[in-house]
Image (tube, grey):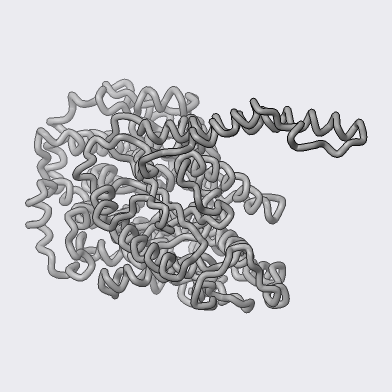
């Protein structure tokens, strides 16, 4: 084992891709359900570049997805073509084509409903293979059994006609696990990898507000799964884990969880990445921030009409987004911290205002009338101001042409003044700005609204922290906030994701590649990854809350200090921090993280075909010793280097110009990201 760029390099036999076939199996291939869809979609380009036409994705067939995302074509590979034909002749419907995403990978899609007539027979096969029975009423588990049985059948047909090519199959999550179990039970000559992105039981336990991480070694796993009526699913997941040649998880924290929940330590950690698109202009992402921030400011002007007594240029936009899991996603600790932040800002008489958005979908029955009215009032005022400006400009222009300094009384006639007064009167409101943009179906019991009532954050004039719950995913077609999620993120100043249960965490990762600082925790895979790779994460705009080794009260205080420190930064300090944050995007690029998947594939080949491939490393992959250095310029951690009270966001410290050399710092950071290594080319049958 040697080291390259802090990452281990296994010098192994040459693996000509042309002699291998790679299949990735997941329920979310062309079928967006959650984060696994993002993993597969964003990774496809890097994998397709490496494997070419020998890379295939296997997933379920849904007519709408097929029509909108897949271009039908005939398989170029003979083994795959014959497998598809054989299954179609025997009463299945197998669809083949190219998925219209970056990389255009081949996809094999199985029609689950069309093959449901085999369900009872396949239940018997699973019982014979691993003694796991599936209840008739669990439709999802039944669908997964059909999907897995079709996958195993397909892989058998492929290996029968592979003509010397070795097959690697990677299965994602328990939904695809049945295919792995049946493939191994039938002794198919394939190398298998099982990747869990979050354990099934872990999700259920954390959703029940149990002190999960402090009791990992104390749970009676069978009892907990049985009480939640998911014992059969848990058995399917655990069987897949133990059947696989290589077991992988997406983060160190999930690996610890899997070791206790599934009773197997992961062989490889495969972090999740993104397709990072660099702008040719270095500061283009800063320009996009300014542009989209202006659009959010427009929404805020309408939402807070009649109470707009704060300076929008000194207003910070914070947000939390994701599934509505109040505790798992950390919305509970975030709201409590906002209450404390509001107290600190008021106590120090700060002129900084914080507007916080909760983008978490919940059941609603329509837009809030008061919110719609606010946007209508704002638009009306804009139209009035625009028409008066046109008249004013024409009269001013005519006066200047005559060589006169115009009299303001002549420029504004009585009608103009009347219109402007009526516009001012229209902005008066008797109620406070609403805390939610929609009418909630469960208003009285909604966790976020109930907490807002308890802590008293009602958007009063005296509050320095304002809260807006947007219980719907963002869309550019919305009449309220017409922005896509990416545009909205770019316009905000800070993303806050203090999750308790987050196996990876794409939301803070997306913030990072867009150059937006974020708050995460050491219970998220992303937070652990950044702690491992960055010497001073805070200096790079990654605030990591300790929720693993601190009490909830201490974690809440730490989050409050992070938020308060962020509010104290000057505008220049925020710009410096955004530049640093954006530079971390190289760490999250699949071109860099794809090497972890290379390790998993080489390792599984060495275990599945030990006579052919000699590649077993002496130790599991590690990234120890590889870190972004602490920036030499000051402030390294803005929150720790400020005065004790907030200062105006437009104040700039002249001394910082001498202490911060962006180009020098950026070059030093670039040197820390080495180009992805290539596995050594060694003559067949020998070890280097």
x, y (%) of residue 220? 9, 63
The answer to which of 12 and 137 lies nearer the viewer is: 137
Residue 514 to residue 410: above or below: below
Residue at the farthest right position: 403
In this rendering, does residue 486 appear at all?
no
The answer to which of 354 and 346 lies nearer the viewer is: 346
State the image quarter where residue 589 is shown.
Answer: bottom right
Residue at the location (59% across, 66% down)? 570
The answer to which of 345 and 126 lies nearer the viewer is: 345
The answer to which of 86 and 135 lies nearer the viewer is: 135
x, y (%) of residue 170? 37, 48
In this rendering, does residue 188 appear at all?
yes
Residue at the location (55% across, 54% down)? 311
Residue 35 to residue 13: above or below: above
Residue at the location (39% across, 73% down)? 619
Instruction: Count all numbered tags in the image, as a single digit.
Output: 0
x, y (%) of residue 39? 43, 48
* Left or right of residue 682, residue 149 in this image: left
* Left or right of residue 491, residue 393 in this image: right
x, y (%) of residue 381? 56, 33
Residue at the location (13% across, 69% down)? 218
Residue 73 to residue 139: above or below: above
């Amino acid at each position: 084992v040697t080291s390259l760029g802090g990452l281990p390099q296994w010098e192994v036999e040459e693996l000509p891709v042309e002699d291998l076939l790679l299949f990735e199996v997941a329920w979310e291939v062309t079928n967006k359900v959650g984060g696994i869809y993002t993993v597969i979609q964003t990774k496809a380009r890097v994998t397709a570049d490496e494997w070419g036409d020998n890379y295939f994705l296997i997933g379920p067939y849904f007519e709408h997805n097929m029509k909108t995302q897949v271009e039908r074509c005939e398989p170029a590979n003979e083994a795959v073509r014959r497998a598809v034909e054989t299954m179609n002749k025997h009463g299945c419907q197998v669809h083949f084509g190219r998925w219209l995403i970056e990389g255009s990978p081949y996809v094999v899609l199985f029609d689950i409903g069309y093959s449901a007539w085999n369900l009872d027979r396949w239940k018997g096969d699973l019982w014979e293979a691993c003694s796991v029975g599936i209840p008739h009423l669990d439709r999802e588990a039944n669908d997964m059994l059909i999907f897995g049985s079709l996958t195993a059948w397909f892989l058998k047909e492929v290996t029968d006609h592979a003509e010397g090519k070795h097959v690697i199959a990677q299965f994602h999550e328990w939904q695809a696990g049945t295919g792995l179990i049946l493939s191994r039970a039938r002794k198919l000559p394939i190398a298998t990898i099982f990747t869990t992105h979050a354990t099934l039981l872990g999700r259920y336990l954390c959703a029940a507000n149990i002190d999960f991480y402090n009791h990992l070694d104390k749970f009676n796993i069978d009892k907990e799964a049985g009480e939640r009526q998911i014992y059969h699913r848990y058995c399917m997941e655990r069987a897949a884990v133990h059947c696989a040649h290589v077991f992988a998880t997406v983060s160190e924290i999930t690996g610890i969880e899997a070791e206790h929940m599934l009773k197997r330590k992961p062989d490889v950690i495969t972090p999740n990445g993104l397709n990072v698109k660099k702008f040719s202009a270095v500061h283009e992402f800063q320009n996009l921030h300014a542009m989209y921030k202006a659009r959010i400011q427009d929404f805020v002007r309408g939402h807070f009409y009649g109470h707009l007594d704060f300076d929008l240029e000194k207003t910070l936009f914070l947000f939390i987004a994701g599934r509505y899991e109040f505790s798992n996603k950390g919305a509970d600790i975030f709201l409590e911290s906002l209450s404390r932040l509001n107290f600190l800002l008021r106590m120090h008489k700060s002129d900084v205002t914080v507007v916080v958005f909760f983008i978490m979908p919940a059941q609603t029955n329509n837009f809030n009338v008061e919110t719609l009215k606010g946007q209508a009032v704002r638009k009306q005022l804009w139209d009035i101001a625009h028409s008066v400006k046109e008249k004013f400009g024409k009269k001013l222009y005519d006066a200047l042409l005559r060589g006169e300094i115009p009299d303001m009384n002549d420029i504004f006639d009585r009608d103009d003044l009347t219109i402007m007064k009526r516009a001012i009167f229209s902005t008066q409101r008797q109620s406070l700005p609403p805390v939610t943009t929609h009418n909630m179906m469960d208003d009285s019991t909604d966790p976020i609204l109930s907490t807002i009532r308890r802590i008293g954050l009602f958007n009063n004039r005296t509050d320095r922290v304002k809260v807006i719950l947007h219980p719907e995913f963002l869309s550019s077609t919305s009449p309220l906030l017409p922005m896509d999620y990416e545009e909205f993120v770019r316009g905000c100043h800070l993303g806050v994701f203090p999750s308790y249960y987050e196996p990876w965490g794409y939301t803070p990762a997306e913030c990072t590649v867009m150059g937006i600082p974020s708050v995460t925790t050491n219970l998220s895979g992303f937070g652990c990854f950044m702690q491992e790779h960055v010497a001073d994460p805070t200096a790079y705009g990654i605030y990591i809350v300790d929720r693993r080794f601190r009490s909830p009260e201490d974690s809440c205080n730490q989050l409050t200090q992070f938020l308060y420190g962020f509010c104290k930064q000057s505008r220049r300090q925020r710009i410096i921090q955004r530049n640093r944050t954006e530079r971390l995007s190289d760490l999250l690029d699949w071109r860099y993280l794809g090497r972890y998947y290379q390790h998993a594939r080489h390792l599984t080949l060495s275990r599945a075909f030990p006579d052919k491939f000699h590649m077993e490393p002496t130790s599991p992959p590690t990234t120890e010793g590889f870190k972004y250095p602490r920036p030499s310029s000051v402030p390294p951690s803005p929150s720790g280097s400020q005065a004790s009270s907030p200062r105006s966001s437009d104040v700039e410290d002249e001394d910082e110009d001498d202490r911060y050399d962006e180009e020098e710092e950026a070059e030093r950071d670039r040197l820390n990201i080495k180009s992805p290594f290539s596995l050594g080319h060694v003559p067949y049958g020998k070890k280097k």
